[in-house]
Amino acid sequence: MNNDRPYVMCLMMTSVDGKILGEKWGNSPKMKILRNKFEEAHEELGIKAWIVGRTTMEKDFTDFTKPILKKGHQTLDRSDFVAEHQSDSFAIVIDGKAKLGWKESTMQGDHVITILTEDVPDAYLAHLRDIGLSYIFAGKKDISLKTALRKLRSLFGIEQLMLEGGSHINGSFLNEELIDELHQLLLPIADGTIETATLFEIEASVKKKGATLMKLENVKRIEDDVLWLTYKFDY
């Protein structure tokens, strides 16, 4: 592992056909029990910093709040902003185009860090500063995951990071060989749809190599017929 970035674990739950959580799975009592397995595994692993993509964040956490821009003329340089905070846990999101709206700097007790490109409005940054939400830049127009991870380690002291989707951000990390471990909760569910996203998705135009090899480290059967598979990556 490269010591200038956090050790990255990817935690996801999937159907037996490799699909990630979808609305079409329903809300039956059994399904609700299975959905809770993710949080149970998250707590058991005990990683205090987690990261998701913008789509996952707005769907599951920020409820599609629109970006908030501070009124008046704002001029800010493109330097990283580490806000004052007391938390030792972090909720991190990759939002290169500043599409997320934020009203506060914490989420369920975790200090929020957003990863941006330099091509975002000054008024957006001014609002983040006002509410004490940290941000870092990881590219001029496109996000460099390697830059983002180095800054999370150097600026916030994050040594372990939990990657929690969605499929495209998982695929981006995989494509850059930035995942060290995969924890896959294999649910006793068959999705069967073409539309539902899979665990890792990479556009053919940017995919760097063929299939990625992994080494199976552990198989554990947990309650409700769920398999917890742990893999290490062999890049």
Image: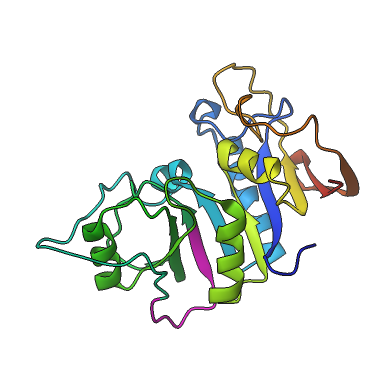
Q: Is residue 39 visible?
A: no
Frontmost residue, 48 versus 132: 132
By secondary structure, the bulk of the magenta-drawn segment is best described as loop
In the image, residue 103 above or below residue 201:
below
Q: Residue furthest left?
A: 72
Q: Residue 19: which quarter of the image?
A: top right
The x, y position of residue 5, in whole percent, is 67, 65
Instruction: Say whether residue 84 is magenta.
Output: yes
Frontmost residue, 65 versus 118: 118
Q: Residue at x 32, y 44 (%)?
A: 64
Q: Residue 186: which quarter of the image?
A: top right
The x, y position of residue 49, in whole percent, is 58, 66
In the image, residue 107 above or below residue 198:
below
Describe residue 93's horizontal placement relative to residue 177 as left or right.
Answer: left
Q: Is residue 194 visible?
A: yes
In the image, residue 200 above or below residue 9:
above
The x, y position of residue 66, in whole percent, is 25, 47
Frontmost residue, 50 versus 228: 50
Quarter occupied by the N terminus: bottom right
The x, y position of residue 33, in whole percent, is 61, 44
Count of marks placed on residues: 0
Describe residue 171's horizontal placement relative to residue 112 as left or right.
Answer: right
Q: Which residues are magenta?
A: 83-92
Q: How is the image coloured?
A: rainbow
Q: Residue at x 22, y 55 (%)?
A: 68
Instruction: Say whether residue 231 is magenta.
Output: no
